[in-house]
Image (cartoon, helix red, strand yellow):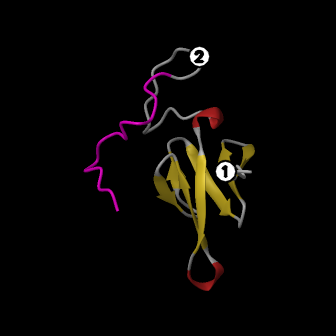
Amino acid sequence: MYDDHGKRDPFLPLVGEGGNIISYETDFTVSDLVLEGIMAGSEGAHIAIINGRVVKAGDQLGNFFIQDVQPESVIIKKDNLKFELKLEKED
């Protein structure tokens, strides 16, 4: 497993679609988040990899709260808005 030593992933963009500088600690937008994988954990719990970070239900990623990790999607919440990140299926 790669240890980033607390530094930014060099493969993540520094500038968002709108031309603004992205702070990966707080300034995520939904379009910046990429669901890279979901793994089944013990006792039916799932963990997800979003933008290279391993998260589970109850975690926070930037300004988003991870509400639920399902077998093929992750439900995230920001303020009163809910979003669903889905796994992209390759053909």
Q: Is residue 35 above or below residue 31?
A: below
Q: Is residue 44 magenta?
A: no
Q: Is residue 48 visible?
A: yes
| Left or right: residue 12 compared with residue 77 | left
Residue at screen point 45% across, 21% down? 21
Q: Residue 33: which quarter of the image? A: top right
Residue at screen point 53% across, 58% down? 59
Q: Is residue 41 above or below residue 5?
A: below
Q: CA distance from mark 1 to mark 2?
A: 22 Å
Q: Is residue 57 visible?
A: no
Residue at screen point 52% across, 59% down? 55
Q: Is residue 9 magenta?
A: yes
In the image, residue 29 lies at what x, y percent? 60, 33
Which residue has dot 1 on it? Answer: 76
The number of callouts visible is: 2
Query: What amino acid is at disc 1?
Result: Ile
In the image, residue 66 lies at what x, y percent? 61, 55
Query: What amino acid is at disc 2?
Result: Gly
In terms of secondary structure, where does tag 1 sit? Answer: strand
Residue at screen point 46% across, 29% down? 13
1 vs 2, front mark: 2
In the image, residue 27 lies at what x, y percent? 50, 32
Span of residues in magenta: 1-15
Mark 1 or 2, nearer chain start: 2
Please tell me which residue lies in front, 58 or 19.
19
Which residue has dot 2 on it? Answer: 18
Q: Residue 8: which quarter of the image? A: top left
- Crowd tier of the residue under label 1, counting other residues whose Cα lies within 10 Å: few below 14, some 14–19, many 20 or above: many
> Which quadrant holds the N terminus?
bottom left
Which SS does the magenta portion mostly show?
A: loop
Please tell me which residue lies in front, 28 or 9.
9
